[in-house]
């Protein structure tokens, strides 16, 4: 049940809102400022047209009705209808422009967020459940889009509405207008009190949803393992706990939200009641007309409407600020491995690789490589062996510059790889991992992934070289076979063969094979050996393999342990030394025997 606690670990909550996130959001709003200003203009015209209605009503009650002036009454009614139609037409165009701006803002944020995620280091993905990353790109961006378009514009519009309402109200009657304004300090105190509680509640909702999404995503991917170990009941219990957390935090947040509009409505009712009470007392003395009281009451109703709207916007703002912070926290995540400002293009790689006094650690104080130095000549094949966690994969990751060294240098053909662009470096390298990732699409699309301009003949030749063509051609649709998400149609061995073809097609100058044949059976591996020999010919290659029989013919074998190279030489040289490699090799051969 330890995983239950792991997935209930929430991300840290900031106590104070970071204004920087709003400033970052403003750059997306600026791109569509003309549309937003147009929408604001339509809204302003609609709002002003509605504000004339109480004045028209006052004139009808105080003049047309007492004087039985039918012509004037008809004119006032037509004016009311006209103002209403203007408001409806303007609202239509405003809505159309706001939807357009909102969807464009969603597109831009999501595009920039995805582009930034593509640049983040392996360590970022190693440290986080993928579900927590996914929910930011999809759900959170959708949630904040309305706030960034409609929300901020509506705040400005409602403030302008309030100003115009106050002006119109004071032109009708000053005393009764002051009665309306008496409720404002009460409202301000109420909103200030509830603001902090709402923000923290919605940030907790954000955390719990993120936890739930992360656990759900992992369990969908690991469904087979769940069934193999009969973990359905335990997982259901964990999921129920996470769902319960989501429900409880949501209910708490909504309960704070639901206090806002009743609070505003209560203050509004009290103020309007005061208007009628105060107005009637004055009316008895003949100081106020019925039309004036009705008009001020109408303006009071309209006065509290923008405040109610601002309250709703405020609610929405509080709800979505937690999401906005999460989005821009991701965008603020530093790109640890990036091109230097003066980075140059990597020349065409010949294949000489040199490590000079390299130190590296994933976590501060826990060094994985300590003062590692070696040199590999052009076209040499180098095998890295040693216990798990010794640093074999770390070395090849540093060659590809998936991480930056703490100190020292990694050079290819005498060029410090930290001084060249990542694209020019990695485009000349081929990397085969133990977990061969297959994308949704056809087999042909997957093989062509690293070389989009490859011809069908080149794809078939690469597949034939690595012994993948035989099983591909057995499918009814051959290379056009759809392999679904993560290559679910293929066996693990078939995925690796497709990955081999993909790597060979890209024609890499340096080749990295990290347990690349681990899921291929011995018979297929023997057939594949000719293809591997073709891949390795003329290329500098780094090979990590647990089956030591596959690396006997390598030009150089390095035994890695305790952060350094303990032994280095050919298979025969190391066997003659009868050291660490000798004991590892003989132990494995005895196990096989």
Image (cartoon, rainbow, N blue to C red):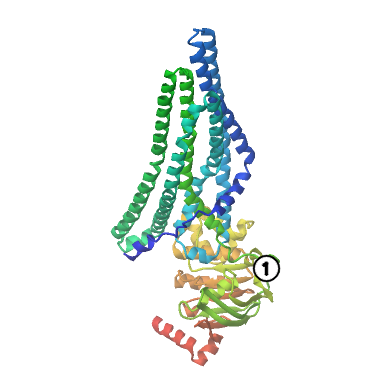
* Residue under the image location 52 percent in, 92 percent down: 576
Relative placement, left or right, of 321 versus 250 is right
Q: In this view of the protein, which residue sits in the foreground, 27 or 435?
A: 27
Q: State the image coordinates of residue 264 (x, y, percent, origin top left).
A: 42, 37
Q: Residue at x 54, y 72 (%)?
A: 513
Secondary-structure class at tag 1: loop
Residue sitting at the far front: 285
Q: Nearer the viewer, residue 230 or 56?
A: 56
Q: Residue at x 60, y 56 (%)?
A: 456
The percent coordinates of residue 139 (x first, y second) are 47, 49
Question: Residue at the location (55% across, 52% down)?
Answer: 19
Residue 467 seen in the figure = no
* Residue placed furthest toward the left: 233
Name the residue beneath numbered marker 1: 420
Which quadrant would the N terminus be assigned to in this image?
bottom left
Pick the quarter of the image with the C terminus: bottom left
């Amino acid at each position: 049940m330890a995983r239950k606690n792991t997935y209930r670990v929430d991300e840290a909550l900031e106590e104070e809102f970071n204004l920087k996130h709003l400033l970052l959001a403003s750059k997306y709003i600026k791109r569509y400022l003309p549309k937003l200003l147009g929408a604001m203009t339509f809204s302003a015209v609609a709002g002003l047209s509605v504000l004339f209605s109480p004045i028209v009503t006052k004139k009808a009650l105080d003049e047309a009705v007492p004087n039985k002036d039918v012509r004037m009454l008809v004119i006032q009614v037509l004016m009311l209808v006209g103002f209403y139609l203007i408001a409806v037409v303007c609202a239509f165009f405003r809505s159309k422009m706001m939807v357009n701006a909102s969807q464009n803002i969603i597109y831009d944020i999501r595009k920039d967020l995805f582009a930034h995620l593509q640049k983040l280091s392996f360590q970022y993905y190693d440290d986080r459940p993928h579900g927590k990353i996914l929910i930011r790109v999809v759900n959170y961006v959708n949630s904040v889009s309305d706030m960034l378009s409609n929300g901020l514009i509506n705040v400005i519009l409602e403030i302008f509405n309030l100003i115009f309402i106050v002006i119109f109200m004071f032109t009708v009657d000053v005393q009764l207008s002051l009665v309306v304004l008496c409720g404002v300090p009460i409202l301000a105190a109420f909103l200030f009190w509830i603001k902090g509680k709402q923000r923290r509640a919605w940030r907790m909702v954000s955390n719990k949803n993120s936890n739930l999404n992360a656990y759900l995503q992992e369990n969908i991917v690991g469904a087979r393992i769940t069934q193999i170990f009969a973990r359905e009941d335990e997982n259901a219990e964990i999921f129920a706990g996470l769902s319960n957390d989501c429900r409880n935090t949501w209910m708490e947040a909504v309960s704070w939200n639901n206090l806002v509009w009743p609070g505003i409505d209560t203050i509004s009712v009290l103020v309007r009641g005061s208007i009628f009470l105060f107005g009637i007392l004055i009316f008895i003395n003949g100081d106020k007309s019925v039309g004036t009281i009705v008009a001020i009451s109408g303006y009071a109703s309209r006065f509290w409407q923008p405040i109610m709207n601002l309250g709703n916007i405020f609610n929405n703002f509080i709800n979505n600020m937690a999401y906005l912070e999460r989005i821009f926290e991701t965008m603020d995540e530093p790109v640890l491995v990036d091109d230097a400002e003066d980075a140059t293009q990597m020349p065409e790689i010949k294949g000489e690789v040199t490590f000079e006094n390299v130190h590296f650690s994933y976590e501060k104080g826990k060094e994985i490589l300590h003062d590692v130095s070696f040199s590999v000549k052009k076209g040499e094949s180098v095998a890295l062996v040693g216990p798990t966690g010794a640093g074999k994969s770390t070395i090849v990751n540093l060659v590809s510059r998936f991480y930056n060294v703490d100190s020292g240098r990694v050079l290819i053909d005498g060029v410090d790889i930290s001084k060249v662009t990542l694209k020019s470096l990695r485009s000349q390298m081929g990397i085969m991992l133990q977990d061969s990732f297959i994308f949704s699409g056809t087999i042909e699309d997957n093989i062509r992934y690293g070389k989009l301009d490859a011809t069908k003949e080149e794809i078939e030749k690469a597949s034939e070289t690595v012994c993948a063509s035989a099983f591909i051609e057995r499918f009814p649709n051959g290379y056009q076979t759809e392999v679904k998400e993560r290559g679910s149609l293929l066996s693990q061995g078939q995925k690796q063969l497709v990955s081999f073809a993909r790597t060979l097609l890209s024609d890499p100058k340096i080749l990295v094979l990290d347990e690349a044949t681990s899921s291929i059976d011995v018979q297929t591996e023997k057939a594949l050996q000719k293809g591997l020999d073709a891949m390795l010919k003329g290329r500098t290659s780094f090979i990590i393999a647990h089956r030591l029989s596959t690396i006997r013919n390598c030009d150089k074998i390095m035994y890695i342990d305790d952060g350094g190279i303990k032994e280095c030489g050919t298979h025969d040289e190391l066997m003659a030394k009868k050291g660490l490699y000798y004991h590892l090799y003989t132990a494995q051969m005895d196990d096989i025997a």
